[in-house]
Image (cartoon, helix red, strand yellow):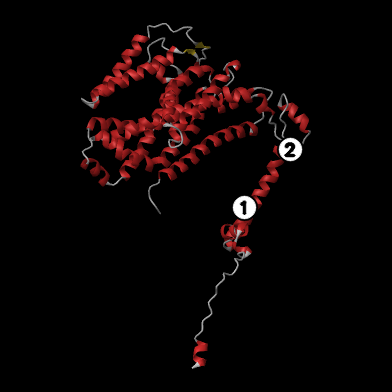
Amino acid sequence: MADTHAHSVRFVRDTMLPEQEPPGAERGVVKWMRENLFSTIPNGILTLLALYCIWWMLSSVMPWFLNGIWDAPSIRACREILEGQLGGCFAVLTERWNQLLFGFQYPSEQYWRPTVAFVLLFIAIAPVLFRKVFPAQMLVFTAVYPFLAYWLIWGGSILVPIFAAAGIVAGYLTYSRLVAQSFAMGFFGGILAALVFWFVVGFIPTEGIVALEPVASRNMGGFMLNLILGTVCVSLSIPFGIALALGRRSDMPIIKAICVIFIEFVRGVPLITLLFVANVVLAYFLPPGSNFDLILRVIIMITMFASAYIAEVIRGGLAALPKGQYEAADSLGLDYAQAMRLIILPQALKISIPGIVNVAVGLFKDTTLVSIISMFDLVGMIRGPILASTDWNGVYWELLGFAALLFFVVCFGISKYSQWLERELATDHR
């Protein structure tokens, strides 16, 4: 009996064993490398090959950077300083930075104006891009910014942008009063009110009233021109693209036919052709002696081009929504405008974010095509006045690398923001 009781006793631990470090192969950098770089034999071989390629590239390029010359009046002086050694002539960037950023005809004493406009751009887009961080009251400055930026960059009297903004306000007030009767009456009534307002104030003299030195569009250049075209055209092409996408899916035959013809025609024509039309052909359709600003013509053509592509991206987002979303809007008694604004478009735009960003990035890079029509943007400045001068003829890698770096920073920033926005708007749980 005692023997049975002895075998029935169980050992119960009343203290915990101290924690031990995991094995070295299962923690830190070693674990990450084993899982990501050397998980299999083929992956290990590819990793070693990639490391060799990186080492070879760095060993070839780094001396070119480290031995670079940043202070020299010409390429010949750079070569004399290098004395046959490998090194880049980065002095062209320090000597011609103003032309690369602002062009060679923008007044040097007025560089502060586009610089201030560029800084204010971030303040204006902050409440739009990060609506949860910045107060909604900042949207007032966002609405004012386009007119303020125009006055800063182009100059002239401040009454010109004020009258332009007032005309838009008059059109919106007219639209808000007439839209209750019908959308068409409100839309066309608002446009008519704005045109009448601008026609009336056009007789008011504006010279000398809080004026900055006027700068003609032909004097715009450098990376500033790329930023102007990219920012304005992307901002305008998104609402126009939405309107075209909705028009293409409309049940009204005339509206649908117009949108289909516009989208298919623009998507079937190269952008460079549209730029030549803006530069040369469009002048034949204008009255004799009229002067239609070249930058405005280019903005119209690039916006048309981007709007057609964005329209197809958004149409794909609309088609991806299940039919139940449209039926849910109908069951709530919402009209077409309310259903699109509150239910359909928010979901379609969320689906379309990658495609819209892809078009925006491609559009910003395509602004360099304006150099073909003798507009001295960043690439035009490099190919034209800088490389054409005897002082810097032959400096290619430094200038083109600088241009590539600027475009990469902007495009990479747009791409990273779109990825962040997708994560913020994600509602599915995986």
Residue 79, image x and y in percent?
A: 75, 30
Q: Secondary structure at mark 2?
A: loop
- Please tell me how crowded label 2 is: few (under 14), some (14-19), or many (20+) other residues with Cα within 10 Å: some
**Amino acid under label 2?**
Leu
Q: Nearer the viewer, residue 166 or 396?
A: 166
Under mark 1, the amino acid is Ala
The residue located at (51%, 18%) in the rendering is 152
Marker disc for residue 50: 1
Nearest to the observer: residue 79 or residue 251: 251
Q: Where does the image place residue 427, in percent across and percent down from the top left? A: 38, 47
Foreground mark, 2 or 1, reads 1
Q: Is residue 187 above or below residue 216?
A: below
Q: Residue 283, relative to residue 320: is it above or below?
A: above
Determine the image quadrant of residue 136.
top left
Task: Using residue 196 as the reference point, say whether residue 48 is left or right of it.
Answer: right
Q: Earlier in the sequence, mark 2 or mark 1?
A: 1
In which quadrant of the rendered view does residue 268 lie? top left
Q: How many numbered circles does the render carry?
A: 2
**The C terminus lies in quadrant:** bottom left
Residue ID for mark 2 = 86
Looking at the image, residue 290 lies above or below residue 88:
above
